[in-house]
Image: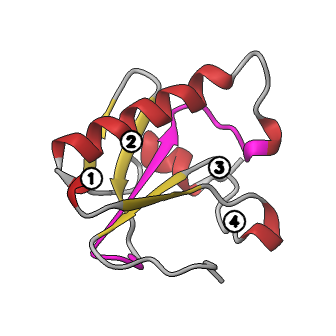
Amino acid sequence: MNCLFCNIIKKEIPSEIVDESNHSIAFYDINPIAPTHILVIPKTHIASTLDIDDNNVIYFSDMVLLASKIIDDKEISRDGYRWVVNTGKHGGQTVNHLHLHILAGRHMSWPPG
């Protein structure tokens, strides 16, 4: 398997790490769509939300906790932010490794498009 995010986890591809926990790692997106654009991923390969089950849901929970910690640490919550988890081609998922986007620093419109 040649997964971009798995290679980032293994430090085979450089990235600007924001924070990490035992089960998740967060880094800045290389193609940001907002002034703050951070990705939070599980350190275990889970392709998408379609693959979350009773055995691995702990990884998604850990991602959410790490995202919340980053939002507090970086004081992002003051003006608001958006979490996004894309699933599948029509959902906009471009890397087949579960990831949560933290987007902040600008007004987010609705619908997202």
Residue of label 1: 77
Which kind of residue does numbered mark 1 sit on? Ser
Secondary structure under the numbered disc 3 in the rendered image: loop
Q: Could you tell me residue 106's position as x and y percent?
A: 31, 78
Residue drawn where x is 22% and y is 41% of the image: 72
Residue of label 3: 97
Classed neighbour count for the residue bearing mark 3: other residues with Cα under 10 Å, few (<14), some (14–19), many (≥20): many
Q: Are marks 4 and 2 in contact (CB under 8 Å)?
A: no
Give the residues in magenta.
32-49
- In the displayed structure image, the side of residue 2 where residue 54 appears, left or right: right
Badge 2 or badge 1: first in the primary sequence: 2
Quadrant assignment, res 110 = bottom right
Classed neighbour count for the residue bearing mark 1: other residues with Cα under 10 Å, few (<14), some (14–19), many (≥20): some
Which label is found at residue 67? 2
Residue drawn where x is 47% and y is 25% of the image: 23
Q: Could you tell me residue 61's position as x and y percent?
A: 55, 27
Q: Nearer the viewer, residue 54 or 11?
A: 54
Residue of label 4: 93
Distance from Cα at disc 3 to Cα at disc 1: 26 Å
Which label is found at residue 33? none
- In the displayed structure image, the side of residue 16 where residue 30 appears, left or right: right
Distance from Cα at disc 2 to Cα at disc 1: 11 Å
Which kind of residue does numbered mark 2 sit on? Ala
Q: Could you tell me residue 107's position as x and y percent?
A: 36, 79
